[in-house]
Image: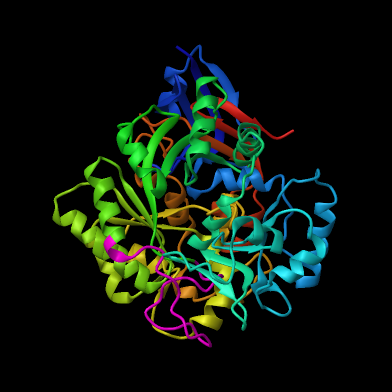
Amino acid sequence: MTRTLFRHDRIRTGDAARPWTDALLVEDGVVVALGDDARESGVGATVVDLPGALVMPGLHDAHIHTEWLSRDLSSVDLREAGSLEETLELVRAHAETLPEGEWLHSGRWNHNRWRVPRQPDRHALDLVAPDRVAALSSVDGHTIWANSLALRLAGITRDTPDPVGGEIDRDESGEPTGILRESAQDLLQAIPHEESPLRPWLERCQEWLLSVGLTSITDIDGEDARAAYAAMHADGALRLRVTKCTRDGDLELAVAEGRRSGQGDGVFRVGPVKFFSDGALGSHTAHMTEPFVGHEGCGIAAMPYDVLLERTLLAARSGLDVVTHAIGDEANRLVLDSFEVVRGEGLETLLRIEHAQHVRPVDVPRFRTLDVVASMQPTHCTADLDLADEIIGPRRLASYAWRTFLDAHVQVAFGSDAPVEDPNPFYGLHAAVTRQRADGHPFGGWRAEERITLTEAVHAFTVAAHESVGRTDVGRLVPGQLADLVAVDRDVWALEDSAPAEIRDTVVLQTWVGGDLAFERA
């Protein structure tokens, strides 16, 4: 048995009945006593005096794409580019560093930030990458910008029909522009392509996540990530707790293998199945009940409702929890309709809507009635607020409505959706409390009535995030809970009223998982 007495003047427990303590006794990775009881019972235990201004529970990212995030480490970062010209120059410079024949991938370009906010085309990309496949993902991951070579190798021509749930953008003459939306992105899979092994990149990514205070995650990516995490776990190299989702296309494989949500151990577990109901706001593919301002379309239904319902029921009947992506108000309505059928069959499956960004007020109580978690990402709000005003306008919707959901007694779980946004959870805490960007825009916060307290935001990143995947053994620093904790350089609760902008700048000094030191800042 290992016994450790952790000491610090300000330890935030996450327990409303006893929010603060100054000592934790941990035995074999589990908290067994607090305060005076910990000191009295901890005679002979190893003593650790934790650094920094505050100790708090480790944070859980309820929605993160670590394969994407890891692969992005080897790609060009186009997020901050302010124009097409700047974007192309970054692509050109990166392409010059690559071996012959290697793809240009990822990128995370965001045309909504450009001085002329117009989606690019293949001809522009051909100027800087004519001789290698270029397939650059938009920041939201719902659009790919491909060059002419990529289209030719994939066999995408003017005669290629739009796939179900996707769109091949075409110019006035009917030729593909190089913009592939939603499921049309999958057409590029026809191109033979070998990627470098994922595990080394995941190990680098793990270090990054631990360094920002994440002790556990719900990973949304596919079977390659599952296999890499399983290998890391078998070798004792997995220091994060990982709940691993199954993608829609792998549902039959998961059923055949007998996977059930919750299988596994305290470190690596089977999670829910992930479905898509629509696209994203930045790509104008979120499924809305009314057209976007200045556009004729209402977005894209990524999956016809009858197929969505069939897939959802297959997962639920097979013992797999379900998380479904829905950003637009029509998408949220349809997913709730599918979940109502699940509940009508008496299935106690854990159900989540991923993002729940724009919801009709009449649908908010349905989350509570159907016991559906709103899995949300606070930094989506601060990234999208100008765009939301521009293309959604003043229509009456609950948008990034954390306060509204909590007041309706809906369980809210927070994450980042990295690499769409930065995985640092303190960025998310800052956004939840202020509804402002790092530069303080907009003054007073965007739709400030939807701000929540820091305690509520931390709860959404800890207890609620864990509960949303069926875990009740971690998230608080109280007896019986796993000893996942972080020591940080500032007391964020002291900053909440006096200087909330500084919450975003919090630096993690140490991260402990199960009572073991997983990260220490040099």
Q: Vertically, is 53 above or below 309?
A: above
| Range covered by the magenta-colored residues | 280-306
Image quadrant in which you'd find residue 108:
bottom right
Judge left or right: residue 123 versus residue 24.
right
Extreme residue toward the bottom, this view = 294
Image quarter hosting the C terminus: top right
For the image, the number of numbered tags is 0
Q: Position of residue 120 (x, y in %)?
A: 69, 72
Q: Nearer the viewer, residue 177 or 318?
A: 177
Does 233 sit above or below residue 66? above
Does residue 137 appear anywhere in the picture? Answer: yes
* Residue plotted at (72% across, 45% down): 74
Q: Quadrant of the N terminus?
A: top left
Q: Position of residue 502 (x, y in %)?
A: 65, 58
| Pick the front one: 378 or 145 | 145
Q: Per the image, is 176 magenta?
A: no
With 234 as the anchor, is 191 left or right in this view? right
Q: Is any atom of residue 421 visible in this view?
A: no
> Which residue is pictured at 64% across the width and 50% down the height?
506
Our reading of the magenta stretch's main secondary structure is loop
In the image, is residue 460 above or below residue 83? above
Give 106 or 370, whichever is nearer the viewer. Answer: 106
Q: Is residue 299 magenta?
A: yes
Quadrant position of residue 512: top right
Residue beneath the point at 14% across and 50% down: 346
> Which residue is depicted at the point 56% across and 38% down?
486
Q: How is the image coloured?
A: rainbow
Residue 490, how many percent across, how many down?
Answer: 63, 47
State whether residue 388 is above or below residue 501: below
